[in-house]
Image (cartoon, rainbow, N blue to C red):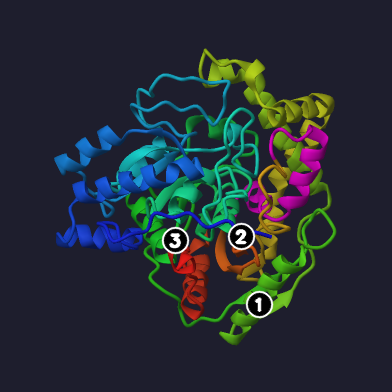
Amino acid sequence: MVQRPCIHAFCDDALGDCDAVGLAERLRLGEVCAAEVTEAAIARALKVEPSINAVEFECYRRARQQSAAGNTSGFFAGVPTFVKDNTDVRGLPTNHGSAALDTPPARRSDPFARQFLAQGFIVLGKSTLPEFGLNATTEFVHREPTRNPWNPGYSAGASSGGAAALVAAGVVPLAHGNDGGGSIRIPAACCGLVGLKASRGRHREKPHTRALAVNLINEGVLTRSVRDTARFHAEAEKYYCNPRLPRIGLVQGPVRRRRKIGLLLDPVTGGRSDPRTRAAVEETAKRLVGLGHRVEEIPMPVPPSFVEDFGLYWSMLAFMFERAGHRVIDPGFEPDLLDGLTRGLSDQFKRNFYKAPGFIYRLRRSHRDYARVFITLDAVLSPVLTHTTPRLGHISPQVPFEELFERLINYVGFTPWANASGGPAISLPAGFTENRLPLSVQLFAGHGQEKTLLELAFELEASQPWPGIQDIAH
């Protein structure tokens, strides 16, 4: 098999190979200025975008003006970034990855965007996502897919696939994402990044998410280093801290305390994880044991009914988009232009609507069942996905719905547990496949225990630092 070259924009410019914390420090010291950094990021985006298709909208002129003005404040003042195109940023459209929408620029930024932008980021534009974030790959019906920079014949994951591709390729050191079923952790896994899905309610939420029967969605970032993820969440707490959750604070490294960690190797859907995925998790478990932690395999803590329950809730969300898009998103919404996955999911809910009271009740109850797991455990280690990153086309919205739905269920076998229960989980790099694609592992912790996840992540990163795409390419 011919190996396609990886795609990246790392070079000797104002960005260098800095992570976001490192770049913020250089900006504060005056080693580089915001205008230089912004210009470098724009040049990098222009270089790789024709190959990775990760930018939904650009606002480079506005970014240049903002960086030249030099009036941003916050820890990350002057650091360039992208916001996922399902989040309103004043002056930019929000089309949710769908051909059914062509919205005017937003009049105001939504609550989380304000929390995000308060840290001083310079927004270069919006990143791509699959239609309404419903798919696990950032692919479309009538245009080119977002490609994985490590190997462009493969998926970049989803739904924050554009964000992951831009960070992995070195365009920006950090980008916004959100996670409703794995949508930060899946693209982080596919693109060799750090992706933390925070506890439910950790950050400011979009107004409509609070009205959902079960709020699955959490906001966050995709990064190339654990310290970037840790610093982002610490700074976000300065803007808003949910009084119902323990503070994370600034986590700066591992701690001496050794943890008791459960090990899950196979998905709730039944069957086994594929051999390479399984080996990455087992190797990580051995490293944790070598570091002094106690790791033991545990029985699946999720009931078999969870698969159908989550699938039907997922379908209900698609039904809501199809039926109410013109009211809750934009009056110009055109449901006839929805892709096959959205329409198929919506039709599936119509056939099963009478099951809604039962699956909503059970998904709400998962919060209690999840908490019970962490009475005796500090964390749980698992794969992020049931098998390695698929080729483009395998879970495309152009695949017939029944076949596509089965493939998705068999692929996303671990991440939804944290969304339904509201617990935190983090995706971390853990090696590579023979196709030069990243492998990853996932850690879960009890509600509000992001600090535990970050401490363990720092320890794993220090024990075996993961290379960036620029290191592998050379």
Q: Quadrant of residue 424?
A: bottom right
Q: Which residues are magenta?
A: 396-424
Farthest top residue in view: 331
Q: Residue at x 14, y 59 (%)?
A: 30
Q: Quadrant of the C terminus?
A: bottom left
Q: Is residue 387 above or below residue 467?
A: above
Horizontal side of 132 relative to 26 (left or right) equals right
Crowding near the residue tagged with mark 3, few <14, some 14–19, many ≥20 C-alpha atoms within 10 Å? many
Residue underneath mark 2: 3
Horizontal side of 37 relative to 127 (left or right) equals left
Q: Tell me which numbered mark, 2 or 3, is placed earlier along the sequence.
A: 2
Horizontal side of 109 relative to 245 (left or right) equals left
Q: Tell me which numbered mark, 3 or 1, is placed earlier along the sequence.
A: 3
Q: Nearer the viewer, mark 1 or mark 2?
A: 2
Q: Residue at x 50, y 71 (%)?
A: 466
Q: Nearer the viewer, residue 27 or 237?
A: 27
Q: Where residue 262 sits: x, y (%)?
A: 69, 71
Q: Where residue 92 sits: x, y (%)?
A: 37, 28
Q: How many marks?
A: 3
Disc 2 to disc 3, how far (Cα)? 24 Å
Residue underneath mark 3: 224
